[in-house]
Image: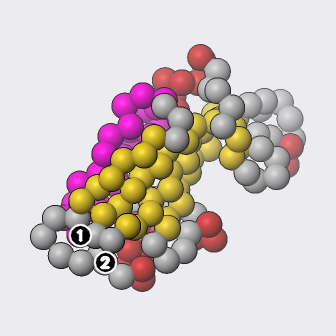
Amino acid sequence: MTTPTHGRLMIKLAAIGPYLRDKRSQKERYFFDSLVSCVNAKKPPEEREFWGWWLILDTKDENFVAQYGFGRYDLSGDWQSDPLPKNVVEEVEANLAEFEKLLSAGMLEHFNIQMPKATEADENRLQELAISS
């Protein structure tokens, strides 16, 4: 099986939920993230930062490489690899696990691609995924 087209992937990945970031995705590179927990909810909305995760899914030949990151989404709209506070680790991991279920189901159902599991909050994990025929 060959890699699905960019258009087909964007449609299917967008259907998974609010995780795909169209503006940060491009052909052969797809960016997902989730703002899970507010750093300081007492600040006005425009001054809030968030704890969460991001995932970059790159195509490589007939494989995908998934890179996970955990940290803080800052005021400029960038992810910083800051260590997660202990009180949010469980919530961030649960949110990522839910996303992984949705992504795995969508990728397997439409493209027969097996996704890896990120079972620990481990920064910048790289995993290759073979596209089966």
- The quadrant the C terminus occupies is bottom left
Query: Quick one: label 1, few (<14), some, or many (20+) residues within 10 Å?
Result: few
Residue 56 in the image, given as x and y percentages of width and height: 50, 56
- Disc 1 marks a residue whose amino acid type is His
Which residues make up the magenta segment? 93-121
Say whether disc 2 or disc 1 marks the residue closer to the N-terminus. 2
Is label 1 in a helix, a strand or a loop? helix
Viewer-nearest residue: 130 or 43: 130
In this rendering, position of residue 22 left or right of residue 10: right
Instruction: Identify which residue is drawn at 44% across, 63% down.
Output: 58
Viewer-nearest residue: 20 or 83: 83
In this rendering, position of residue 107 left or right of residue 1: right
Count numbered badges in the picture. 2
Residue 92 in the image, given as x and y percentages of width and height: 52, 32
Q: Confirm whether residue 12 shows in the render.
A: no
Query: Quick one: label 2, few (<14), some, or many (20+) residues within 10 Å?
Result: some
Q: Are marks 2 and 1 in contact (CB under 8 Å)?
A: yes
Asked whether 29 falls inside the magenta stretch, the response is: no
Residue 96 in the image, given as x and y percentages of width and height: 45, 40
Asked whether 96 falls inside the magenta stretch, the response is: yes
Residue occupying the far top of the picture:
86
- The quadrant the N terminus occupies is bottom left
Q: Which residue is mark 1?
A: 110
Instruction: Identify which residue is drawn at 42% across, 46% down.
Output: 126
| 34 over 10 or under it: above or below | above
Residue 40 is drawn in which quadrant?
A: top right
Q: Which residue is mark 2?
A: 4
| 49 over 106 or under it: above or below | above
